[in-house]
Amino acid sequence: MEKILCYSCNKSKNKLEVKKSSLLPINLLICESCITSKFEPRWVIILAGRSNGSDHVKEFIIKKRYLGNEITASELLI
Ligand SMILES: [Zn+2]
Protein backbone atom coordinates (compact mmCIF):
# COMPACT_ATOMS: atom_id res chain seq x y z
CA MET A 1 0.00 0.00 0.00
CA GLU A 2 1.17 3.46 -0.80
CA LYS A 3 2.30 5.36 2.23
CA ILE A 4 0.59 8.64 2.85
CA LEU A 5 2.47 11.26 4.78
CA CYS A 6 1.08 13.81 7.13
CA TYR A 7 1.03 17.19 5.32
CA SER A 8 2.33 18.88 8.41
CA CYS A 9 5.06 16.70 9.92
CA ASN A 10 5.80 14.63 6.79
CA LYS A 11 5.79 11.41 8.77
CA SER A 12 3.92 8.34 7.71
CA LYS A 13 1.25 7.55 10.23
CA ASN A 14 -1.24 4.74 10.52
CA LYS A 15 -4.06 7.17 10.75
CA LEU A 16 -4.49 10.52 9.06
CA GLU A 17 -7.50 12.75 9.32
CA VAL A 18 -8.92 14.91 6.59
CA LYS A 19 -9.04 18.37 8.02
CA LYS A 20 -10.06 21.60 6.39
CA SER A 21 -7.24 24.09 6.51
CA SER A 22 -7.99 27.09 8.68
CA LEU A 23 -6.02 29.29 6.31
CA LEU A 24 -6.76 28.12 2.77
CA PRO A 25 -9.86 26.58 1.17
CA ILE A 26 -8.24 23.17 0.90
CA ASN A 27 -8.40 19.86 2.70
CA LEU A 28 -5.33 18.58 4.44
CA LEU A 29 -4.31 15.12 5.54
CA ILE A 30 -3.07 15.59 9.05
CA CYS A 31 -2.06 13.20 11.79
CA GLU A 32 -3.59 13.26 15.22
CA SER A 33 -0.62 14.79 17.00
CA CYS A 34 -0.49 17.68 14.52
CA ILE A 35 -4.23 18.23 14.95
CA THR A 36 -3.81 18.29 18.72
CA SER A 37 -1.06 20.88 18.39
CA LYS A 38 -3.26 22.84 15.92
CA PHE A 39 -0.47 22.78 13.37
CA GLU A 40 -0.88 23.82 9.77
CA PRO A 41 1.66 22.70 7.19
CA ARG A 42 4.45 25.24 6.79
CA TRP A 43 3.75 25.68 3.07
CA VAL A 44 0.08 26.41 3.75
CA ILE A 45 1.07 29.24 6.08
CA ILE A 46 3.47 30.64 3.48
CA LEU A 47 0.93 30.42 0.66
CA ALA A 48 -1.80 31.97 2.78
CA GLY A 49 0.57 34.72 3.88
CA ARG A 50 1.50 35.49 0.29
CA SER A 51 -2.05 35.60 -0.96
CA ASN A 52 -3.80 37.16 2.03
CA GLY A 53 -1.09 39.16 3.69
CA SER A 54 1.09 38.45 6.68
CA ASP A 55 -1.56 39.66 9.16
CA HIS A 56 -3.66 36.69 8.13
CA VAL A 57 -1.01 34.20 9.27
CA LYS A 58 0.52 36.20 12.12
CA GLU A 59 -1.10 34.02 14.82
CA PHE A 60 0.41 30.89 13.34
CA ILE A 61 3.86 32.38 13.06
CA ILE A 62 3.93 33.96 16.51
CA LYS A 63 2.63 30.82 18.20
CA LYS A 64 4.79 28.67 15.91
CA ARG A 65 1.92 26.43 14.90
CA TYR A 66 3.95 24.65 12.24
CA LEU A 67 6.94 22.38 11.95
CA GLY A 68 10.23 22.98 10.20
CA ASN A 69 12.43 25.99 9.73
CA GLU A 70 11.25 29.32 10.96
CA ILE A 71 9.14 31.21 8.47
CA THR A 72 10.81 34.51 7.68
CA ALA A 73 9.15 37.74 6.60
CA SER A 74 10.85 37.55 3.21
CA GLU A 75 9.25 34.18 2.51
CA LEU A 76 5.86 35.81 2.85
CA LEU A 77 6.68 38.62 0.48
CA ILE A 78 7.92 36.77 -2.59
ZN1 LIG B 1 1.66 15.20 11.55
Image (cartoon, rainbow, N blue to C red):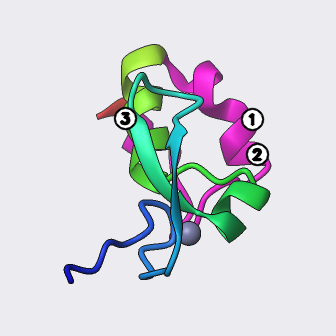
Distance from disc 3 to disc 2, alpha carbons, whole Å, reads 17 Å
At 50% from the left and 18% from the top, the residue drawn is 53
Residue 61 is left or right of residue 24, and the answer is right
In the rendered structure, which amino acid carries the disc numbered 3? Answer: Leu
First in residue order: circle 3 vs circle 1 = 3
Residue 7 is left or right of residue 38, and the answer is left
At 41% from the left and 37% from the top, the residue drawn is 27
Helix, strand or loop for disc 1: helix
Distance from disc 2 to disc 1, alpha carbons, whole Å, reads 5 Å
2 up-or-down from 56: above or below: below
Task: Give the percent coordinates (x, y) of residue 71.
Answer: 52, 54
Proximity of marks 3 and 1: CB atoms separated by less than 8 Å: no
Quadrant containing ligand 1 reads bottom right
Question: Mark 1 — residue?
Answer: 59
The outermost residue toward the left is 2
At 61% from the left and 21% from the top, the residue drawn is 56
Res. 47 mark: 3
Comparing 11 with 52, the one in front is 11
Distance from disc 3 to disc 1, alpha carbons, whole Å, reads 15 Å
Comparing 15 with 23, the one in front is 15
Proximity of marks 2 and 1: CB atoms separated by less than 8 Å: yes
Q: In the image, which residues are magenta?
A: 53-76
Residue 73 in view, yes or no: yes
Question: Mark 2 — residue?
Answer: 62
